[in-house]
Amino acid sequence: MYDSFSNGWKNAREIAMEKSYAFMDRASEDRLEGDFQRRSYLANALRRQAEGDAVTREELAEMGFLILSASLDTTSALVNWLVLHLALSPSTQRTLRKELTAAMRDRGAETLVPEMYQQVRTLPYLHAVLRESHRCTPAIPINVIKKNKASALEIHGETIPQNSSILLDSYSVGWDPEFVPQPERFRPERWMDDAVEGRKGTLRQVLDHKMYQKPFSQGARQCPASRVANFEVLTMISQLVLDWDIALSEESEKSVRSFQDVPYYQGTTVQPVMPGFSFTARS
């Protein structure tokens, strides 16, 4: 898994760095096209650099790569997997649609409003669907690649030699039957309040630890764009479910019975090779 992730990351980085350098060259020659490019983050960063900001050309290119991979690749992978899970689970769509319409009715609203997404208690099933997708098919199954440069480490009796690469595996626990019964099944109900309460005092309560609850980590090291990413995904999926019945196409149904039947590829994120879908507009 590490080799696949590492190779995909390196390839994506090379492409992004090449594009960032090309953008910088166009900017230095005053060849940026339109307001969209001239008002972009990288264009503004280049102007700050020219005014004396101590950021190097290489650092700007690295920043461009990280912004692209974090803001686009992760969100697109998560949305793709979510659409696939929903297409394979009509009952999940029905339950989610019922929750969404009830939330709008309770607020006297004709459409979903931003405040509804901010509190888990307002739309608990929607947040449970998102979390179950993270568990089954995380966009990034390996997080936090670091080296212990200072010294060797001992964790739970295991010695990690100095200068070892250390990775946080955010995938395996969610697929361990000791922690998650029938892990191959997509069941958002695992994350509803009654299920969380039932795990208290057992080995499985580790699933509800704050450091495991979200894919964006916690505290000072939490992804700074986590709220934006969550809001984007929750908004898109909610509107899709309200407006459409999502299913696999007749051709795809012949070969896809479960999300495990869907091939995927790994670059900066794990992306499904999307099968054909059928979208039926709801009146």
Image (spheres, rainbow, N blue to C red):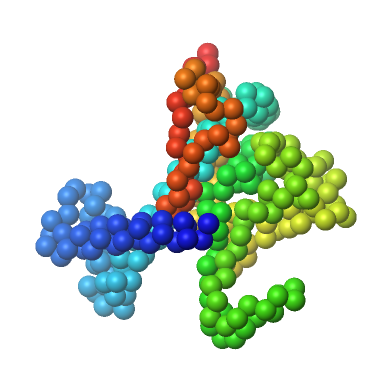
Q: Where is residue 158 drawn, in percent x and y?
A: 70, 75
Q: Is residue 279 visible?
A: no
Left/right placement of residue 209 relative to residue 197 reads left
Tally of numbered tags: 0
Q: Is residue 39 visible?
A: yes
Q: Position of residue 70 (x, y in %)?
A: 44, 55
- Furthest toward the right, the residue is 201
Q: Residue at x 51, y 43 (%)?
A: 78
Residue 84 located left or right of residue 199: left
Which residue is at a point 83% across and 56% down the rendered structure image? 203
What residue is shown at x 80% (from left), y 42% (from top)? 195
Q: Locate residue 151: give its quadrant.
A: bottom right
- Frontmost residue, 105 versus 138: 138
- Residue visible at 78% across and 50% down? 178
Which residue appears farthest toward the bottom when viewing the image? 151
How far from the left and from the top, in percent, is residue 241? 56, 27
Above or below, 241 against 215 in this view is above
Note whether 61 is above or below 152 in the view shown.
above
Residue placed most toward the observer, 117 or 217: 217
Q: Observer-nearest residue: 158 or 57?
A: 158
Q: Nearer the viewer, residue 223 or 269?
A: 269
Where is residue 74 shown, x and y percent of the image?
47, 49
